[in-house]
Image (cartoon, grey):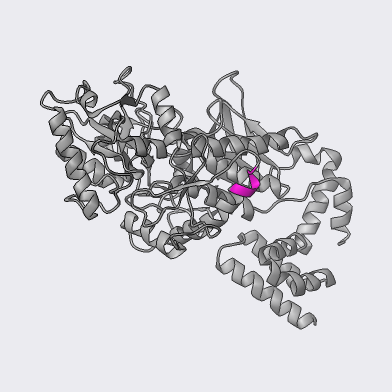
Amino acid sequence: GGGSALDKGMATVAALAARGMITEEEEDGAVDAVVTMDPGIALLALHYADLDPVKFARHAARNAPWARARIGTQAAAFGEEALAEAPLDAVIVGGGLAGLSAALTLLDRGGRVAVLEKMGHLGGNSAWASSGVNAVDFSNNPTNDSVEAFTADVLKGAQMGSNPLVSVLTEGASDSLKWLRERLSEHLTLNLVGQMGGHSHPRTHRPTEGLAGSGMIFALEKQLNKYLNEKNPRLTMMKWTRATKIVMKGDGAGVEGVEWTKVKGGSESGTIKTNHVVIATGGFASDYSEDSLLKKHRPDVLKYATTNTKGTTGDGHKMLMEAGAKMLDLEDVQVHPTGFINPQDPSNMVKTLCAEILRGEGGILVNRWGKRFVNELGTRDHVTGEMLKNDADTLQFAVVLNQAQATKAFTHMGLYQKKGLITRYDSLEELSKWSFWDKGVTPKVLTASFKTYDDQAKKGSDPYGKKYFHNTPMNGAGPYYVGIVTPVIHYCMGGVAISAGGDVLREDGSAIPGLFAAGEVIGGLHGKNRLGGNALSECVVFGREIGKRLPIAPPPTRSATVGLAGGA
């Protein structure tokens, strides 16, 4: 059956290559291996090609005659030192959710990985993301949600027409949710689900204890620490380390490594050798510096505070541009309508995000005069725009929750109360004395606002286009929980252009070999407006996608060399 095995092998490799599921190098290797058709590959083609085509192609690629020879000579030349000298399978720049998802996936496959993180702790903005991770959960789907509905919601929010990255996100999210629940089950339980603005179904998953982002980072870190503690660890974790340059091969044909420098705890710098670099550095929404991308592309938003950590300064974008990568939509910066103003520190430029889930559970937005003015579940750009129209002078608004709503969002509410961002008032009478209100606000004014809202909830519509009224009534439903919110720079939709498999693209649309990107640093997925909960999903989906795709070199030890060189 040599002929049929050959046909099958070739067809499988061609299909995977067409869908971008294997790298060009893997494609070449697999084709060579299939053409020379040693008996082992013929067997593989017959049994594995249908069952796990990607595994088949990668295995075939590793057995290509030239690949075997190359690994053989490299290991033979270095002997036991090869392990230290051989380039790493990947260097990941950025220790947020995208970078760590890629790292764990690679390590689980046997890869050798270094993670560079500019701050002293992992997580970046992912650790601050609180609303949850979006996915259609086929194991528990009472509202009959579908990937099609999820895709339609993302495209509607994005307002950019069809886009190949969207289906990678919406289809991949279900599998990623399953992976988070199974692979991180030791420290993570995602058992609550909520409905966020712009979504037609509840599909934003979060834990009962703590917040989604920090919970996921903590659980990932625990698994990565197991790899760090192995006798010969395949993971190198470099914190307080800033990547400064992606080193390209002399002929521009691919990457060779990453230059780095210590930010704290020393002034060393150096270069790590690798054929694969994953840029997962996040956005630039905290870059108020002179060469800031915000200043260049969106000077109008510099008046707002930000929800982003100090490290979010577009380092990845700047390195990628230098490497010849194409950038998309850098002017598309998302302003989130609700960042908390801390009464103790009102002028601080870094604000705590007031999670959308507070409005998702029914919380309302009210101006200084005690009146509603917007569909609280509208898209982020819509809500921000209405705030600018309603009170451009102070840009300060109240978020108001009744007891039922606060109970539903209890993990967030507890945290915000501890931080002094949310205050509790036992009755409407008490609430009317809050110092935030304009002096014309009386119990009568608030009662009228709440009663109007309750009537609209009964009808299922209001003048602002709201359709979902959760946990009503508002009137007579105290205690009430309130905080002051203002628009904040939150997220960069724009970024580097990538293929559906995470390859970084040049201006002409070709991939830069060995250079990958995932997470907020990429552009073109969210269009004009990212839906809440899609940031964490994007990190896991694309981080894992790259982690599954990168070729992994077999460990160059003597015993392995003999086996490979001998064609075993």
Range of residues picked out in magenta: 181-185
Position of the C terminus, as image quadrant, is bottom right
Left or right placement of residue 192 versus residue 370 in this view: right
User: Residue visible at 75% across and 68% down?
Assistant: 33
Q: Tell me if residue 512 can be seen.
A: yes
What x and y, as percent, mark residue 268?
A: 61, 23
- Camera-nearest residue between 48 and 59: 48
- Give the camera-side residue of 182 and 95: 182
Percent coordinates x, y for residue 231 in the rendering: 80, 34
Q: Residue at x 84, y 57 (%)?
A: 564
Question: Residue shown at 45%/63% (left/top)?
Answer: 144
Q: Position of residue 356 (x, y in %)?
A: 36, 41
* Quadrant placement of the N terminus: bottom right
8 relative to 163, above or below: below
Reply above or below: 550 against 363: below
- Residue 483: x and y in percent read 30, 28
Of residues 133 and 236, the one nearer the viewer is 133
Write the residue at 45% across / 38% down.
Answer: 129
Query: Is residue 255 visible to the viewer in this orientation of the structure?
Result: no
**Residue 478 lies in the magenta-colored region:** no
Q: Nearer the viewer, residue 333 or 213?
A: 213
Task: Determine whether, in the image, residue 449 is placed left or right of residue 355.
Answer: left
In the rendered image, which quarter is residue 373 located in?
Answer: top left
